[in-house]
Amino acid sequence: MRLVALLVLLVIAPATHAHSLGVSATLRGKQVEVEAYYSDDTPARDARVMVHDHAGRFVAEGRTDEQGKWQFAAPQPGPYTVVVDAGAGHRKSTSITVPAVLPGDPQAGTPPTGPISDGPSRAEFTQFPWGRMALGLAIIAAVAIGWRSSRRGVRRMPGPQNDGGANP
């Protein structure tokens, strides 16, 4: 029973991300701002950032500052990949799409401003996973209750060593 409970927990438990790396990109005028941060909401300082186009060609490279940010000139509209390497196994890539200037835009020549990366925002990435924690605790409680219930149903049968010497 214990082995089954352990296997069930291992199969349904989500992967743990202790101090994982998150990356987001925002278009700010004619600049792309890349922000790298850990799941505990601390900035990924001095992390190496590399940007490649859809064909894998190098576009830009730099390092994050003390706030975990780095900016580069917005490339031509299209899809790109941003890779952040913060060392010690913390590496994350995300896809970004640099939008084209919208036709009829009153500020022709100025691209729109806003998030351009796939995936969760910094606020979403760094929030405490209350739902997953509650689910994990509920699973542990259910397994414990099941184990305890199964133990109550087991009755000890008297054997030759436990019969108090009644049988010679």
Image (cartoon, rainbow, N blue to C red):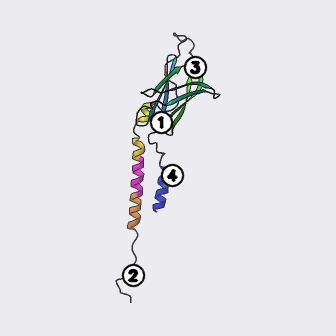
Q: Rounded to the nearest whole Å, what is the CA distance between mark 3 and mark 1? A: 25 Å
Q: Which mark is residue 11?
A: 4
Residue 113 shown left or right of residue 162 in the figure? right
Foreground mark, 1 or 2, reads 1
Specify which label sits upstream in the sequence, 1 or 4.
Answer: 4
Q: Nearer the viewer, mark 2 or mark 3?
A: 3
Would you say residue 59 sits in the magenta stretch? no
Please name the amino acid that badge 4 sits on.
Val
Give the Cα separation between the discs numbered 1 and 2.
60 Å
N-terminal of the two: label 1 or label 2?
1
* Crowding at mark 1 (Cα within 10 Å: few <14, some 14-19, many 20+): many
Label 3 or label 4, whichever comes before in sequence order:
4
Q: Are marks 2 and 3 in contact (CB under 8 Å)?
A: no
Q: Residues within 10 Å of mark 4 (few under 14, many from 20)?
A: few
Pointer 4 with pointer 2, Cβ within 8 A: no
Q: Position of residue 68 (x, y in %)?
A: 44, 28
Location of residue 34 with respect to 4 vertically, above or below: above
When the figure is inspected, residue 98 is found, relative to residue 106, above or below; the finding is below
- Category of crowding for the residue at label 3, using alpha-carbon neighbours closer than 10 angstroms: few (below 14), some (14–19), many (at least 20): some
Q: Can you identify the residue that label 3 sits on?
A: 75
Residue in the foreground of this view, choosing between 42 and 79? 42
Q: Nearer the viewer, residue 100 or 154?
A: 100
- The answer to which of marks 4 and 2 sits earlier in the sequence is 4
- Most extreme residue toward the bottom is 168
Mark closer to the observer (1, 4) = 1
Per the rendered image, the range of residues in magenta is: 135-143
